[in-house]
Amino acid sequence: MNAPIPPRIRDAWYVLAWSHEVGRKPIVRKLYGEPITLFRASNGEVGALVDRCPHRGVPLSGGVVVGDRLQCPYHGWEFTCSGRCEAIPSFLGDPDHVGRRAQAHAVREQQGVVWVWGRAGAEPTEEPFHFEYAGRAGYTEIRHDVQADATVHAVAENALDVPHTAYLHGGLFRNADVRNRITAEVRRWHDHVECEYIGEPRPTGIVARILSPSGGIVTHYDRFFLPSIVQVEYRIGDENHFVITAAGTPADDYDTRLYAVVALKSRIPGFVFRVLKPLGLRVFAQDAVILAQQTENTHRFGEEVYASTEVDLIGPHILKLMRRAERGDLGPQKAEPWTRSVEMDV
Ligand code: FES
Ligand SMILES: [Fe+2]
């Protein structure tokens, strides 16, 4: 059965690679199913061209970088990072012509991340997301990317969903038999939504014990920023601050790559990271399995039918924002967010 098409937000930035992955040898990444080749020109600029030569359609990614241009492997046409054709061997006329341009995506490279605008040939209307704690003094940082067979929405909801942690990841964060009543406050702006958990004691799972052996007051925020960025922020006591920010990239409608930047301040950062990375990857592996099953069922039944309660705090808001962004209608930018408080047991 055909699965529904999830929101596609074209006019936005997506991470297609870490900076160190892009060199003179072209690589191929996908965005909404479209293959894009990334290469680094001799002047250091990164090009993102749709991986199809305008001449006879062969993949440009099979070519080589010559100076500041990517040369097609078939007849040697050469394209700049902006897609302009500047050399056609054996042709005596002017190589540049609108019909001979490769389709190019706008690129920004910042904080070690290569961002690509979602619509080829379009001028970006804003700048990419800034990772607030990346490279900040006093913080240890780790970067990692993972993949899930699921929509950006499902991956984002999963990353910010608290109630599943006691079940799918039982014992790692929270335990199903240890319950605490807390208040969650949801705040939604025109382009992001935030959930603050008030009165949460330090969770009882292994991860939390490592982060803060002596307990302490927990401050916990979950956030989603359009088009696809999730952020989980924990402060435990005065000394421990943990911010994981991950940008989701829809390689395809049901194939999402998450580029995560984790920043941590702790009394014992080296030790914490050595232990946390494998644990984090184990947690994500459990999430990836359940997300793939969710996707498989969407395909099996040909539809997504979800029943929600108030403690599905953030997922419905993410979907609402994504649908608005897809329509290009985010509504007015108000200073005061839409707000709701929910009592829940975690
Ligand atoms: S197909 Fe690329 S130059 Fe001919
Ligand atoms: Fe999870």
Image (cartoon, grey):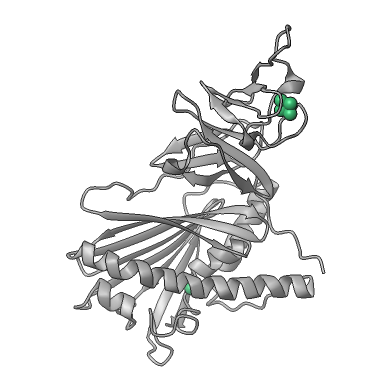
Q: Residue 239 appears at what percent x and percent y?
A: 19, 64
Q: Residue at x 46, y 79 (%)?
A: 165
Q: Nearer the viewer, residue 102 or 139?
A: 102
Can residue 199 be seen from the camera position used here?
no
Question: Looking at the rendering, which quadrant does residue 125 occupy?
Answer: top right
Q: Looking at the figure, which quarter contains the C terminus? A: bottom left
Q: Residue 70 appears at what percent x and percent y?
A: 59, 27
Q: Specify the farthest residue to the right.
A: 1
Q: Residue at x 29, y 46 (%)?
A: 135
- Left-right relation of 177 to 288: left
- Left-right relation of 298 to 149: right
Q: Residue 229 appears at what percent x and percent y?
A: 50, 54
Q: Specify the farthest residue to the bottom.
A: 177
In the displayed structure, 273 sits above or below 31; it is: below
Q: Residue 23 appears at what percent x and percent y?
A: 47, 36
Question: Looking at the rendering, which quadrant does residue 208 occupy?
Answer: bottom left
Q: Looking at the figure, which quarter contains the N terminus? A: bottom right
Q: Nearer the viewer, residue 25 or 182?
A: 25
In the displayed structure, 116 sits above or below 251; it is: above
Number of disc labels? 0
Can residue 115 be seen from the camera position used here?
yes
In the displayed structure, 184 sits above or below 66; it is: below
Q: Residue at x 59, y 23 (%)?
A: 80
